[in-house]
Image: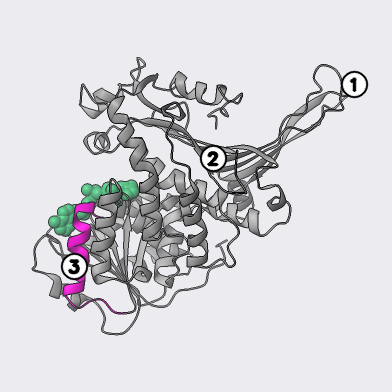
Amino acid sequence: MAARVVPVDPFDLVVFGATGDLARRKLIPALYHRMADGQMPDGARIIGTARSEMDAEGFRALASEALDTFVPAENLDADIRRRFLGCLDYLKLDVSTPEGWTNLRGKLGTDDRPCAHYLSVAPRFFGMIAEGISKAGLVDANTRIVVEKPLGRDLASARALNAQLAEGFEESQVYRIDHYLGKETVQNLMALRFANTLFEPLWNAQHVDHVQITVAESVGIAGRGPYYDNVGAMRDMVQNHLLQLLCLTAMEPPARFEPDAVRDEKLKVLRALEPLIDPADVVRGQYRANGETKSYREEAENDSSMTESFVALKAKVSNWRWAGVPFYLRTGKRLRNRVSEIAIQFRDVPHSIFPGAGATPHPNVLAIRLQPDEGITLSMTVKDPGPGGMRLADTKLDMSFAERLAATGMRMPDAYERLVMDVIRGDQTLFMRGDEVEAAWAWIDPIIAAWQSAPAPKLYDAGSSGPEDALMLLHRDGRRWREIET
Ligand code: NAD
């Protein structure tokens, strides 16, 4: 059974870097799934461009191979594949040269259908492509441009990128993807908060003890070592994904679920973040070998690398709602398991009426799990069953989206499916606005600058929960991290 879908109008989608990893692994499968679910209209045109010499048939063969590799066999259908490949076209275009842009114009329709340009290329090409599209006279009110992290490496470069994009495009035409925002669970966080009366009255410093946001990966950096070594966990994960999750958790209810209403509220959270000045509130880590896996430095091929593969920090949102409530953020590579979650830990009961051993109430925790198994759990204290007296136990109300979808025969859509279709529909709600990106860098920059005086990250064993100092970050506050468990 397919999910309920509203078909979009015919569109043109130009994928720059269409032969690359992101295009083959995410975009092509996402578009195929939208066609399989009946959302892609007849007459949609998807034009791949890259430097490789290839004709449309060659690109279709590449896309077909990507489907075989990245779409589960049970979701592949010969007729849908044929129709999907029929939408594809290809243009060789070296974006670093002025030639070829007029050929792109020839590939696009002359009708006023939406046309999205997806920049699945290294960020050094973003400015060139924005300029190329604009100079070729390809920008009108229905044109959109899509970019994805890294959106700068500090405030100055993020501003420069925003300025480059603004030369050819209005802000309403720029779609900055953070694919975490396309995840079902993240949108469910907003539904949970703003479509129920249960949680919002408790969603404040009076009732919440603290919040933990974890994005733990079990993989290392093999395959992208030199790139990652120049970036590190703070820029690669905290500046974008973790801060976006913090914003959605902490923001005030927007008046409407509309792009600028939502983004205004997220921006207010970023601007309310207290500068992080105490070095003890940030822990940087780097994994060492554990016998089975290589160390970070070996994978980065840099014996003296000081780049962090792990960050844990304590953020504070200085406003009436959140004063005094720490938001603990942590992310890292080569950790024990692959887990992403937001956990809201509520305060202890003000007074326990149950005497004796085994009768201490556990604090309620609402955990919003992004991966591996998307869902929401609410930990509750209940009576341990049996006649052994009033003993208390921690139990979970568990809502697994994957299980629920599986029970109805539906498939969990990938974040890119939702986001690409939002671009076509012209809905920017789940995309970052330029000022949000800048506000996030403005908070991150001084933290990174302070590392100059203490450059060495703390070492942790690959496969562990991170460096000891990260445990101490919470221990000092009388708290502990949730286990990184699947
Ligand atoms: P990639 O190196 O696999 O692909 C790059 C593409 O750009 C190729 O198709 C290549 O032909 C094309 N290209 C290179 N130089 C060109 C030129 N001069 N003219 C025209 N085309 C040119 O890279 P990727 O992993 O697909 O990543 C693309 C972008 O997406 C990067 O900015 C990356 O940081 C970002 N990103 C990637 C992922 C991912 O999962 N791969 C995730 C998030 C963000």
Helix, strand or loop for disc 3: helix
Q: Looking at the picture, does residue 241 appear above or below residue 93?
A: above
Give the quadrant of residue 310: top left
Within-10-Å neighbours for mark 2: few <14, some 14–19, many 20+: many
Secondary structure state at the residue bearing disc 2: strand
The residue indicated by pointer 3 is 131
How crowded is the residue under tag 3: few (<14 C-alpha within 10 Å), some, or many (20+)? some
Residue type highlighted by circle 3: Glu
Residue 83 spot, x, y in % from top left: 36, 69
Residue at label 1?
A: 389
Give the main secondary structure, helix, strand or loop, of the magenta stretch: helix
Task: Please name whichever residue, 17 or 362, is drawn nearer the observer in this view of the structure.
Answer: 362
Viewer-proximal residue, 83 or 304? 304
Indicate whether 232 appears above or below 272: above
Magenta segment includes 134:
yes
N-terminal of the two: label 2 or label 3? 3
Image position of 186 (left or right of 227)? right
Q: Residue at 19% across / 53% down in the picture?
A: 124
| Residue underneath mark 2 | 341
In magenta, the rendered stretch is 121-140
Q: Which numbered tag is attached to residue 157? A: none
- Left or right position of 274 against 404: left
- Which residue type does callout 2 highlight? Glu
Report whether the residue tagged 2 is closer than 8 Å to ligand 1: no
Q: Give the percent coordinates (x, y) of residue 316.
A: 52, 40
Reply yes or no: does residue 370 show up in magenta: no
